[in-house]
Image: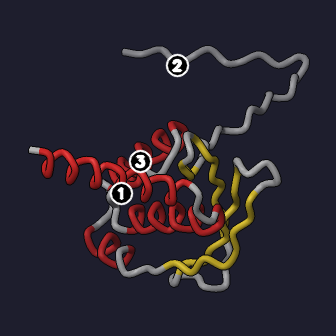
Amino acid sequence: MKKIITIVLAVALMGATFSSCKNGGDPKKDAETAASSFLNSIKDMDYTKAKEFGTDNTAQMLEMMSSFTSMMPDSVKEEAKKITFDISEVTISEAGDAATVKFAGSDAPDKTEEIKLVKQEDKWLVDMEVPQAPQMEAPAMEGTEMPAPAPTK
């Protein structure tokens, strides 16, 4: 019985040691890993997995992407899965709680894009916002009235 307790305690101690090492890792490498995992999940159209690497804002964006993907022809989906990503730069904010990852996809290697990450509970998460339609006011035109709607039969 003593041996079993000793083994269980040793395993628990090793787990705690490895866990603390993981949290004290290289912030750039950790942010790059999170971004890469996110991008590869998107490429594979595994939006459930991609949500693991994103904030709540990102989850909303992924819901939109998922609905658009369902309308894509299978041939387009298969081509998208062939894309690879090359991460060229990772920048960590001075406070250490935000990062920017620059990357290019193999489908457009000359076009550098970037994603933003934030650190929440010691975990890097991609933070994408759902794009908002621009708010535009119609110019006021004096002396004009809106025509009445056409009568319906």
Q: Amino acid at mark 1?
A: Met
Residue 120: name its quadrant. Answer: top right
Upstream in the sequence, badge 1 or badge 2? 1
Residue at 63%, 59% in the rendered image: 115
- Give the label, 3 or 2, closer to the camera: 3
Apparent side of residue 57 relative to residue 83 in the rendered image (left or right): right
Q: Amino acid at mark 2?
A: Ala
Distance in Å between CA atoms under marks 1 and 2: 76 Å
Q: Which residue is mark 1?
A: 14
Q: Amino acid at mark 3?
A: Lys
Upstream in the sequence, badge 1 or badge 3? 1
Residue at 73%, 51% in the rendered image: 96
Upstream in the sequence, badge 3 or badge 2? 3
Apparent side of residue 93 relative to residue 28 in the rendered image (left or right): right
**What is the x, y in percent for residue 56?**
50, 37
**What is the x, y in percent for residue 145?**
77, 16
Observer-nearest of 107 and 97 = 97
- Give the label, 1 or 3, closer to the camera: 1
- Give the label, 1 or 2, closer to the camera: 1
Which circle marks residue 51 in the picture? 3
Which circle marks residue 150 in the picture? 2
Do residues under tags 1 and 2 come within 8 Å of each other at their CB atoms? no
Apparent side of residue 48 relative to residue 93 in the rendered image (left or right): left
Residue at 80%, 28% in the rendered image: 137
Q: Which secondary structure lies at badge 1?
A: helix
